[in-house]
Image (cartoon, rainbow, N blue to C red):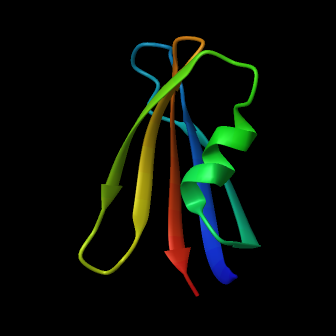
Amino acid sequence: MKEYEVIWEIFNKCPGNQMRDVFVDEVQLEDPEEYVKNKFQGKEVSYDKTVLEDGTVIFDILTSGIKQRCSFTEI
């Protein structure tokens, strides 16, 4: 298993308000994509996965009309 710092951002839908909820956690897991699928299990969800040059894995998620992002950086 690998250890990741996970940053989960929930973007505000209100116009003109750029604030967002941000949660930071450290987790041990094999597959960040499986983590995202489990987190939103039972909900209609779509996401795009991006892997940055430094190995950070980013999921841009849309569920229930709310944009969210989960970023996984290996520690």
Residue 71, horizontal then vertical, whole percent: 50, 59
Return the x and y of residue 54 as percentages of the image width and height: 31, 81
Question: Which image quadrant is residue 63 in?
Answer: top right
Q: Is residue 69 left or right of residue 7?
A: left
Q: Position of residue 8 (x, y in %)?
A: 61, 50
Looking at the image, residue 10 lies above or below residue 29: above
**Please, is residue 74 above or below residue 47 in the view?**
below
Residue 31 visible in the current orientation: yes
Q: Is residue 67 above or below residue 32?
A: above
Q: Quadrant of the N terminus?
A: bottom right
User: Could you tell me which residue is drawn at 53 percent across and 66 percent down?
Assistant: 72
Q: Residue furthest left?
A: 53
Q: Nearer the viewer, residue 16 or 39?
A: 39
- Horizontally, residue 20 falls left or right of residue 52, namely right
Camera sees residue 22: no
Instruction: Please provide percent x and percent y for residue 17.
Output: 47, 24
